[in-house]
Image (tube, grey):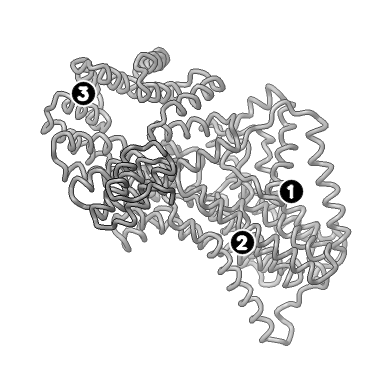
Amino acid sequence: MPPQETYSEPRPRAAWRRPARDILLLAALVYITFVNSLTNPLVDYDDEFGVRTNPYVQGLTFEHAVHAFSLPQPGEWRRAYLPLRDLSLALDYSLGRSLAREDERALTRQLHLTNLLLHTLNTCLAYSLLIGLGLEAATALLAAALFACHPVHAESVAWISGRKDVLSAFFFLAALLAYCRSKTSGWPWRAVSLVSFVAAGLSKATTLLLPGILAAQDLIPPAGNGSVAGGWRERLGRAWKAWLPFIGVALVLGGLHLGVALRSDTVHPQELARRPSSVLISLPTMGHYLAQMLWPAHLGVRYERPQDIRIADALLPVLFLAAAMGWTCRRAAPGRQACLFLWAWCAFTLLPVLNLVPTAAWGADRYLYLPSLGAVGLLAMGLVSGIPAKRLRQAASAGVLGSFAALAVAQNIVWSDSFQLWKNAVQHAPGDAVAGYNLSIHYVRRGQPARAVALLERARSTLGDVPDILNNLGVAYLDAGHAEMAEEMFHRVLEQRPEDATARLNLGFVRLERGDLDGAEEMFRRLLAERPGSADVRRGLGRVLAARQRYAEALQWFEEAARIDPKSADLFRDYARAAREAGNLALALEAARALVRLMPRDIRAVEELARLESAQGNMEYAVQAYEFLAALQPNWAEHHFRLGHLLWRLGRAEEAMQSWRRVIALRPDHAGAKEALERLGRSPAKP
């Protein structure tokens, strides 16, 4: 493979036109692949605590900047020291608010857009790096294109909390390119490289392995680079002093990150001390990552940790790795230096995520954002060097690129809804307690408590009587009508944590469900004295007063709760129900609309909105709501039946009859649809 011509060659038109064209193509490819992620909402996977309810990222102020760099940082999301990530989110909020005020959808779009722009920049930097390695322009373009649309990047790009991956990669690649530039342009570029490295380390801890990449770049020079002379020992003697500042930064920031991780219990070195053999998990972990980078057809949000690892199984990835390395280096003989560097890239960037020290999460797609650059570089070299026929090579490259892009577009959709997110997680990791726990919460919200109970009992059998699991299990039992089982769960929580406010609050709802209004009100009043700012306690009091038919007082409590917590779906559900019972349909409709804004795909929420829109005479809006319900549950006959009545009232007779015939197709014994069609003298034949 001949070396890439340098830009100093005396052909200025070719020197800038092809790179400019390639960068535009790469930017277009990134946009086409990830544009459907721009409308994704915040999901309840770190986004909830890290963005929606985190006041320190909701606007860039001096106070927020101080908090970002302060230690320790309390809060649910403060399990890592990533100040630049927080500052970038705060800057996005400030930009979004200046453009769209308080519209959450516009703010969310701004957050997604920044992720997309950072990924675009990273793709362009990756292309420049690959060109610098001496790859042919076509090979470098193919590798950068594969990086641009790789499906494993959906988690980092389509998920707002994946900001740390795309942001840290930008600084990482910038540091590496500036370091390479410093060899010919002097110390200012070396300073830029060091500052970029610090920024990368303050965005994500895994980037602290950059000194290893710098060493590989110095010891494995690009093919055809006549400026690098001598063997590897001579190159080592010339270069090692340049690495010292980077090693120093890595040690300082590494100690800081390790201290925060130990304090927040995200790494478990005691597990390694107790079972030294647990280090073997790094081998199947490596095999899993290689498979996801080269064959990303089975991506998930969560993955199950391998159990009972055997030596033979653990060695398979190592044998495969050795064989693949030998084959690629042999096939890419002219570009052997680039091939070796890309293997070194994979090795160094995978090292922090191989679970050599056990961590809370075994594996995730976002861990592969940087390592995938080495993998796609090797894949592109394999496609170019391993397929001699030009047409076949082009067809294979186009096929791989198209498959990657299609899988990425599909993976973006997984992140478009919290329920779909956790459903996907359970499908890929049915034994994962965290995935089951989170999916169960959505089943409760969707009015399917039996499924929630099954998932929570499975999580309980794995993790034991964890208070959070017991609290949610109690809520699921209560929603399913098993008040006694729910009460037992809440009492078990209080046995472990007597002052647990959530369990006591839920016991108040148990008493309310049993009709013990006095006991429920007493419980809520006591909690209100302890937690005067609680929206949930006010919701409980509102429900008690609504049950006593003291609607004016109930609605006042709900209004106060809505001011405290305007993003509580349970609150607006109860608020809408109480307002409807009070006969205040306008207020009920307002609450139902707020609920649907918070949970746009929640069946019960959209049903309530559709009924209220119809009751208020807003027939067109009601039709839209029922059409959406019919799309969400196409086999649910009642949605089509009610949609038919609304369409008939609007004078859209043919569409109404089509809806009723759809009902008959789903439920041939549906009396209402038969009667409606017979009254019109039409046959109830299937549409």
Q: Residue at x 61, y 77 (%)?
A: 20
As helix, strand or loop, the secondary structure at mark 2 comes to helix
Q: Amino acid at mark 3?
A: Ala
Q: Does the residue at mark 2 contact the one at mark 1 (Cβ under 8 Å)? A: no
On the rendered structure, is 196 left or right of 325? Answer: left
Q: Look at label 2 and name its amino acid.
A: Ala
The tag earlier along the polypeptide, 3 or 2, is 2
Classify residue 484 by image quadrant.
top left
> Residue 396's spot in the image, x, y percent?
75, 63
The N terminus, quarter of image: bottom right
Image-based side of 472 in relation to 16, left or right: left
Residue nearer the viewer, 253 or 365: 365
Q: Is residue 62 visible?
A: no
Which labelled disc corresponds to residue 529? 3
Query: Does 663 sit above or below residue 398?
Result: above
* Residue 225 drawn at (x, y percent): 80, 71
Mark 2 neighbour class, 10 Å CA radius: few under 14, some 14 to 19, many 20 or more? many
In three-dimensional space, the C-alpha distance between marks 3 and 2, rounded to whole angstroms, equals 55 Å
Residue 232 in percent (x, y) is at 85, 58
Which of disc 3 and disc 1 is earlier in sequence?
1
Quadrant in which residue 298 is drawn: top right
Please count the marks in the image.
Answer: 3
Residue type, numbered disc 1 = Ala
Of circles 2 and 1, the one toward us is 2
Q: In percent of the image, x 46 and y 40: which residue is there? A: 419
Q: Which mark is residue 148?
A: 2
Q: Residues within 10 Å of mark 3 (few under 14, many from 20)?
A: few
Please name which of the two marks, 3 or 2, marks the residue nearer to the observer: 2
Q: Which residue is mark 1?
A: 347
Q: Which residue is nearer to you in this view: 224 or 372?
A: 372
Residue 522 — which label? none
Q: Which element carries disc 3, helix, strand or loop?
A: helix
